[in-house]
Image (cartoon, helix red, strand yellow):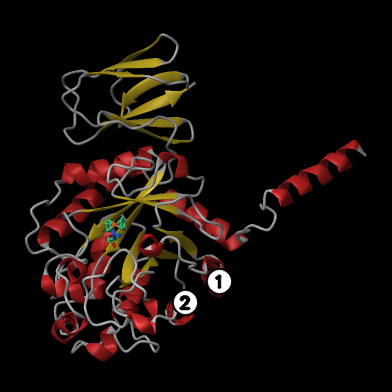
Amino acid sequence: MKKILSLIAFVCLLQASGLAQGYQPSAENLENRAWFEQARFGVFIHWGVYSVMGDGEWVMNNQNMSLSEYGLLPKFFNPIDFNAKEWARLFKASGAKYVTFTSRHHDGFSMWDSKVSDYNIVKATPFKRDIVKELVEACRAEGLKVMFYYSLLDWKRDDYLPFGRTGKGIAGRDESKGDWNSYIQFMKAQLTELLTNYGRIDGIWFDGHWDKKDENWHYDEIYGLIHRLQPHCLVGNNHHIAPIPGEDFQMFERDLPGQNTTGFGTSAEDVGQLPKEVCGTIAGSWGFDIKDRKQKSFKEVLLYLVKAAGHGSNLLLNVGPMPNGEIQDYQQERLRQLGEWLKIYGESIYGTEGGFVEPTDDYAFTKKGNTVYLHVLNGAKRRLEIPNITFKIANITTFNGQSKITYRQIEGDTLVVEIPENIGDENDLVLKLGLK
Ligand code: H79
């Protein structure tokens, strides 16, 4: 009887807190989250008509281009060197497990044969090919899962108006034509196309919420639609706030989870319990920038991946293909270098847990089963003192297990590791800790 009473009390409590009415992910969805969490590495692609300008994907806003000016770009978007199979082979070689493609960015241009907007790759460009379709098929053939980036914000449509925080300098729209309901219906129609015409899609990656952060985005309807069409499909929203019911993963833009270094990122208290994904760029910007002077080294992108894993997060690493359809050589090279590294050290990244020791510039920890991997990220430091190590260590060896490494656990929970001079790796020295 007592048990029944406490059960009733528990259910009442759940209802009072609103949890009982909350989102219940389906079994397929939970299974896909588990896949996502162990995948650890995906490739992000920012490609659209903005690439023609060679000034990033925000060029329309940043250069205050009018609708008629920007509207010329589709006429020049003719990527004769685009080869989806080559891209997919490159992504596969990078060790990535999935690919997230900008199906439609803030400029409102659709990279597929949309029936509800003529402002799309097939109808508005000389190229006339459905890039989404080619990419999905090529990635699938390589065993890569596909997700779609989809912008909530739109700098072109009248029904999106009144203006949000961005796009105010873009001339050519009539604020009297704003029709929020029509805009929401439009997005639902487009998402229905994306989730009906291209087979299995593993995620939708929303962005732009912050443009109208107090607006009613009808997420219940939109997320409900996605999960109805494809129950396993993972919903994420780059809104920079705590997860909303109906979402299946949480992303962090150019930041490790909870480190709000950009000032508009997600604060530490808004980091939730969903699978995590950090996204970042190989270049300085997301979309192709012809004056890119912030190209990252191999070590920089590798540390992104390792630190993300150390936080228990995936890395979604961006390429910004050129308007001819090619990916710049150095971006290709970074992906291939990661792939080579992962061939050797993949067991310390894929399928690991993280988040039990906060990564620093000197080290990151990942764990699989009874093995903890210590990634030594600063080759110059031969002696590491790592606080808050509560697990009991049986031994520390090099990654190949051939050399023993000297260590001590002092003052209860500080681990001291001494790395001999003859052992090293300027990028990431991966050590193995056997647990007691
Ligand atoms: O697609 C890439 C970028 O184009 C997009 N997200 C990645 C994945 C992105 N858009 N904006 N941002 C990233 C950050 C921009 C934030 C700002 Fe603002 C826009 C700063 C000022 C204007 C947010 C909105 C803060 C104030 C208004």
Q: Quadrant of residue 179?
A: bottom left
Report crowding for label 1: few under 14, some 14 to 19, many 20 or more residues within 10 A (C-alpha): some
Query: For numbered disc 2, what is the local secondary structure?
Result: helix
Q: Nearer the viewer, residue 235 or 56?
A: 56
Q: Position of residue 286 (x, y in %)?
A: 22, 60
Badge 1 is on which residue?
221
Q: CA distance from mark 1 to mark 2?
A: 9 Å
Residue at 19% x, 43% y: name it: 300
Residue density around tag 2, few if under 14, some if 14–19, many if 20 or more, within 10 Å: many
Q: In percent of the image, x 45 and y 61: which residue is there?
A: 214
Q: Is residue 369 above or below residue 32?
A: above
Q: Is residue 196 visible?
A: no
The quarter of the picture showing ligand 1? bottom left
Q: Position of residue 301 (x, y in %)?
A: 22, 46
Q: Residue at image x 61%, y 62%? A: 26
Which label sits on residue 184?
2
Name the mark nearer the viewer: 1 or 2. Answer: 2
Q: Quadrant of the N terminus?
A: top right
Please determine whether, in this image, residue 365 is positioned above or below residue 68.
Answer: above
Question: Residue reaching furthest top?
Answer: 411
Q: Residue 154: give x, y in percent of width and height.
A: 33, 73
In the current view of this chain or complex, which residue is farthest to the front?
176
